Image: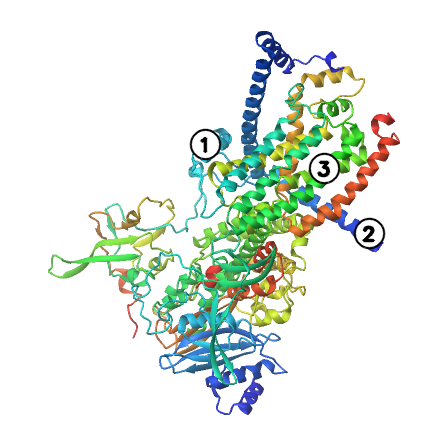
């Protein structure tokens, strides 16, 4: 990392470095694009993977925090910060040309903070309506319901996008049409059986073939990040279960670890075991549901029900362990809320061979079915470069040949003590994603097998202070959730509540890549590809 | 030749007695008129009752395939579930969305239902339970049943809904393609039995069902007919016109109440019609299983009435169709057309040739033994 | 020739895969069904002890509870589900004492995060697994958890509430 520092200093002598656990650079907005471009093009270790970008309101300044990493070695990270003190018309430079994942994120930041990005090709607000008054995540936002009353009038969707482009004669504001004039547009969603939630794809069709997709979201946005800013850390915990509800336990693990790392709480060994086993069970249940939903999207209703049947057993184990089925509510800061119940090991051990048998059955039933193969093989191809550029992680990222398993490159909990294979396929099509999930279920079973008999005795919950205050600073913790990298970013000012809390949601990246991989596919494959990406909408509509 | 066997449960006596009684007491015209009305009423009633039974059976069997138990709340084992559903559908309000083409919108379901009722009338349900026995029965059935597609296209076109439109267009492509295969498969059997009349076809299968008679060729034709018939009824894995994962409900998205009920009934009855044509043409229709020379065995078989044989065979074929439907994912439109134009049609053309050769060279089972 | 071979192998390979799919559903047709017949199976239905369905305040046979009306649960609740309404009473020796008047719990707001139970210093409340909470109107979901006429259980020693969970730390 010293080398990187030198490279940066060579070009930008006035860059400000902070010595934290991650290399942090602060630059002024004019230099930002150039700096990131240099890092992106760095030959030895190209920083081509944008983990997150976070809008910030530091009070005197509005700005953005970027966490860059490398697809070659995702454990190398560098934080870049920039900001502007213009609160009326804040403008920053977009990095969409370097990282496609920045596109939707920049639009979200515009909706939440009002920062507009120069050169972003489509600067509509994401998650919020264009006529929303105020920018909700700003600290001086007026939440008075009279300003933004609940509207019961149907609004037409306007398919025009404004943007600011940099031209030789200065900045130019322009308005572009999203679709062509005679496009046959259908609304897939927000109420649609196969969008896996309240997602809205405006889709231009050419006969059966998808020409263009325009993503609308935010129909179930709950403002969790804003709410969190007024809640204590233990209180925020229960929100995490409600983001990607299929990886509820894993999400919660991330926030717990983030806080524990910041405060310096040592977790009892037993709690680590319980957390890891529960995480893997959660992953299996998430992948089972993904499998079921994908088969259902392809029209095989029976397979859907088989998957749900197997998942039920895991949910029962959750139910007995911590009293929740979907919203598991098990991890707390310092350990777990409930110890395992007496028959936990017996139940889990009975489940493992059962699940293996069922995996074989799934193989016979669906994985080699000639119709299913025709609908998955070579459909929805995603190249490795695009995967990195769109920051698609999880089984979908690994299906395109990118080794991006957090459990491998930044092991947390007990993942450095267990043996498991990171399932990687190179094809990048729907079928690779499909098979990856089934194989990952098998790997999770292996992890559980290695741990289940060795759960040590002892406490399951470390003693913590009643009021948890994080020391001033920024903290980030990523975990491998069912759909990819789930991250929690906390900026603390030493209070018992976070100054800024951001969840890096894997589903957002999965959805953002849909327009790319669905282009020129049939409309029925669009649904099938959606199933293979396995996104969960509440994860996007935080 | 069958009259030698005792047939205690047949309706033959009842129908001929009724006919005789009417003709004795009334002028010719009125006798025929009353008979026509009676047949019409019986057919329509059977149509509705069959549809209800089919819906119940499908829901139950589907549930069993899916590790569930299916309807079980209305009546013992839920047998009145469809009755309740039908009542519900009858009292639902019929609505239409803005700017539909009202005339076509309301006419479409009738095309569907009329097409399937017309076909239904020509099916031989049992010995002497056969309303119309055309000498071109097979031809009539193929011709009339393809009227239904007009209903689907009209429904999709007039609904003022883009999803419906896509569904209808898919349906058109699908129907036109598979009509071809179904027709050819039936033609193969016409070559074998040398007649298009259902009654004669059944008689000719007394001792050897067509599916055995033409051995390889018949078997291929049978499978092709099942596949393309299944596709014609728009049921999974060929349910693209209503593919609920992408088109929500396809061409009947905007229909409600009885209008929707018509589509629903027609769908189930079409399944029945396809199965009964397959049973008649390939499996000997209502003809009991008989073996030439085994009089005792044949008599035993004849104790089971012909309509039971018919419904048994049809039931078996319907079960096959359900089994397939609940096992496979849906095809994509290009896969669907591939299957037809690249596989079924060429095989079919070769098959019809093989059948002609079989018949001409006397290699069918009845010729050989 | 090669394409013809592919055509044939593709055809038979496809048929084989379809048949193996059919064999799976055939087997499933005969195995035990998993549907649970609720509410008929109410007697045999097992709901996990830890299942959180509603908050209750435990009362003993003397109609006494352990709630000291300290309000920690109310403070910890992330979304204002709990309202502790206390009243001041005078004890016999003339001291003023805070006592629980009404403990109001809105089931409709609750996210079942269990924070109130964990943080309660006197273990006065707990979650039970009585899950049949459906009502016809929302206001029925707002419940008073302390029974009519109940009072604080007298502690032999100092009540536990003196120990942990101070409200503010330095």
| Mark 3 chain | B
B124 or A454: which is nearer to us? B124
In the rendered image, the vertical position of residue B123 relative to residue B102, given as above or below: above
Residue A477 image offset from top left, x and y in percent: 49, 71
Task: Give the mark nearer the N terminus: 1 vs 3.
Answer: 1
Q: Secondary structure at mark 3?
A: helix
Q: Secondary structure at mark 1?
A: helix
Q: Report the side of C54 relative to B144 (left or right).
A: left
In the rendered image, which quarter contains the N terminus of chain C?
bottom right
Q: Which residue is mark 3?
A: B183
Residue A452 image offset from top left, x and y in percent: 55, 57
Crowd around label 3: few <14 · some 14–19 · many ≥20 (10 Å): some
Q: Residue furthest top?
A: B24
Say which residue appears at 44% left-offset and 36% top-offset.
C40
Say which residue appears at 74% left-offset and 12% top-offset.
B4
Check chain identity for marks 1 and 3: say if they share one: yes
Mark in the foreground, 1 or 3: 3
Residue C64 image offset from top left, x and y in percent: 24, 50
């Amino acid at each position: 990392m010293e080398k990187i520092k030198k490279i940066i200093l060579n070009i930008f002598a006035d860059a400000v470095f902070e010595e934290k656990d991650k290399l942090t650079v602060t630059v002024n907005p004019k230099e930002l694009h150039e700096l990131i471009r240099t890092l992106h093009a760095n030959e030895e270790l190209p920083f081509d993977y944008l983990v997150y970008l976070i809008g910030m309101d530091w009070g005197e300044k509005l700005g953005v925090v970027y966490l860059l990493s490398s697809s070659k070695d995702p454990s190398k990270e560098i934080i870049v910060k920039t900001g502007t003190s213009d609160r009326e018309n804040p403008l920053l430079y977009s990095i969409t040309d370097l990282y496609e994942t920045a596109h939707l994120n920049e639009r979200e930041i515009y909706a939440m903070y009002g920062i507009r990005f120069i050169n972003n090709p489509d600067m509509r607000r994401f998650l919020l309506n264009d006529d929303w008054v105020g920018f909700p995540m700003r600290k001086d936002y007026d939440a008075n319901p009279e300003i933004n009353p609940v509207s019961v009038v149907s609004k037409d969707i306007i398919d025009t996008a404004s943007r600011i482009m940099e031209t030789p004669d200065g900045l130019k504001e322009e308005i572009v049409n999203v679709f062509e004039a005679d496009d046959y547009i259908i609304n897939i969603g927000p109420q649609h059986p196969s969008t896996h939630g309240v997602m809205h794809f405006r889709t231009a069709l050419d006969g059966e073939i998808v020409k263009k997709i325009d993503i609308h979201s935010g129909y179930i946005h709950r403002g969790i990040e804003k709410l969190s800013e007024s809640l204590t850390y233990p209180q925020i915990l229960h929100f995490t279960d409600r983001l990607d509800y299929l990886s509820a336990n894993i999400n919660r693990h991330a926030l717990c670890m983030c806080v524990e790392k910041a405060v310096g709480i040592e977790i009892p060994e037993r709690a680590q075991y319980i957390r890891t086993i529960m995480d893997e069970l959660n992953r299996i249940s998430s992948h089972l549901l993904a499998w079921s939903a994908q088969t259902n999207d392809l029209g095989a209703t029976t397979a859907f029900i088989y998957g749900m049947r197997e998942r039920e057993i895991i949910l029962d184990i959750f139910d007995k362990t911590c009293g929740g089925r979907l919203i598991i509510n098990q991890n707390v800061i310092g350990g777990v809320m409930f110890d395992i119940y007496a028959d936990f090991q017996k139940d889990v051990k009975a489940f493992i061979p059962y699940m293996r048998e069922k995996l074989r059955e799934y193989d016979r039933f669906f994985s080699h079915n000639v119709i299913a193969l025709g609908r998955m093989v070579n459909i929805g191809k995603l190249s490795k470069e695009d995967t990195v550029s769109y920051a698609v992680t999880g089984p979908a990222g690994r299906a395109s040949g990118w080794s991006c398993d957090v459990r491998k490159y930044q092991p947390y909990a007990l993942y450095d003590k267990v043996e498991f294979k990171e399932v990687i396929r190179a094809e990048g099509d729907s079928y690779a994603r499909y098979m990856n999930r089934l194989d990952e279920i098998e790997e999770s079973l292996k992890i559980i097998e290695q741990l289940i008999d060795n759960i040590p005795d002892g406490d399951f919950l470390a003693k913590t202070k009643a009021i948890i205050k994080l020391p001033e600073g920024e903290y980030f913790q990523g975990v491998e959730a069912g759909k990819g990298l789930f991250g929690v970013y906390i900026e603390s000012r030493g209070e018992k509540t976070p100054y800024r809390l951001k969840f890096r949601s894997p589903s957002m990246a999965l959805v953002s890549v849909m327009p790319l991989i669905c282009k020129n596919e049939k409309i029925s494959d669009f649904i099938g590809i959606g199933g293979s990406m396995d996104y969960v909408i509440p994860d996007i509509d935080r | 030749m069958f009259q030698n066997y005792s047939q205690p449960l047949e309706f033959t006596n009842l129908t001929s007695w009724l006919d005789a009684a009417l003709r004795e007491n009334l002028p010719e015209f009125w006798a025929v008129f009353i008979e026509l009305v009676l047949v019409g009423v019986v057919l329509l009633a059977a149509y509705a009752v069959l549809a209800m039974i089919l819906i119940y059976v499908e829901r139950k069997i589907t549930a069993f395939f899916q590790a569930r138990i299916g309807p079980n709340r209305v009546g013992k084992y839920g047998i009145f579930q469809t009755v309740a559903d039908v009542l519900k559908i009858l009292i639902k309000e019929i609505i239409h969305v803005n700017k539909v083409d009202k005339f076509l919108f309301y006419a479409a379901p009738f095309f569907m239902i009329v097409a399937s009722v017309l076909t239904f009338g020509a099916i031989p349900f049992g010995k002497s339970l056969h309303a119309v026995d055309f000498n071109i029965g097979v031809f009539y059935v193929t011709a009339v049943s393809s009227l239904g597609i007009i209903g689907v296209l009209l429904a999709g076109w007039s609904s003022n809904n883009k999803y419906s439109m896509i569904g209808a267009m898919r349906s058109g492509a699908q129907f036109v393609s598979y009509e071809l295969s179904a027709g050819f498969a039936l033609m193969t059997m016409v070559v074998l039995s040398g007649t298009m009349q259902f009654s004669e076809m059944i008689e000719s299968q007394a001792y050897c069902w067509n599916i055995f008679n033409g051995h390889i060729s018949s078997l291929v034709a049978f499978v092709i007919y099942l596949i393309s018939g299944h596709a014609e009824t728009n049921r999974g894995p060929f349910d693209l016109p209503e593919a609920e994962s992408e088109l929500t409900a396809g061409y009947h998205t905007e229909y409600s109440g009885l209008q929707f009920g018509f589509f629903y009934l027609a769908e189930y009855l079409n399944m029945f019609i396809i199965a009964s044509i397959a049973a008649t043409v390939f499996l000997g229709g209502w003809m009991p299983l008989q073996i030439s020379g085994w009089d005792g065995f044949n008599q035993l078989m004849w104790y089971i009435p012909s309509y039971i044989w018919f419904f048994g065979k049809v039931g078996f074929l319907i079960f096959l169709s359900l089994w397939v439907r609940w096992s496979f994912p849906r095809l994509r439109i290009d896969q669907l057309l591939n299957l037809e134009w690249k596989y079924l049609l060429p095989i079919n053309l070769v098959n019809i040739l093989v059948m002609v050769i079989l018949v001409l060279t006397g290699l069918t089972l009845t010729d050989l033994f | 020739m090669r394409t013809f071979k592919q055509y044939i192998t593709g055809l038979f390979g496809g048929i084989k895969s379809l048949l193996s799919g059919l064999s799976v559903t055939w087997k499933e047709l005969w195995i035990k069904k998993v549907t649970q017949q609720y509410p008929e199976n109410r007697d045999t239905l097992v709901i996990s002890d830890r299942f959180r369905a509603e908050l209750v305040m435990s009362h003993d046979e003397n109609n006494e509870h352990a709630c000291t009306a300290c309000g920690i649960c109310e403070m910890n609740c992330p979304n204002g589900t709990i309202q502790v309404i206390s009243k001041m009473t005078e004890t016999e020796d003339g001291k003023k004492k805070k006592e629980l008047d009404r403990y109001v719990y809105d089931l409709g707001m609750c996210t079942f995060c269990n924070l109130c139970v964990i943080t309660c210093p006197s273990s006065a409340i707990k979650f039970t697994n009585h899950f049949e909470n459906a009502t016809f109107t929302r206001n029925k979901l707002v419940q008073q958890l302390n029974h009519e006429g109940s009072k604080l259980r007298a502690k032999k020693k100092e009540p536990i509430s003196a120990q942990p969970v101070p409200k503010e730390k330095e």
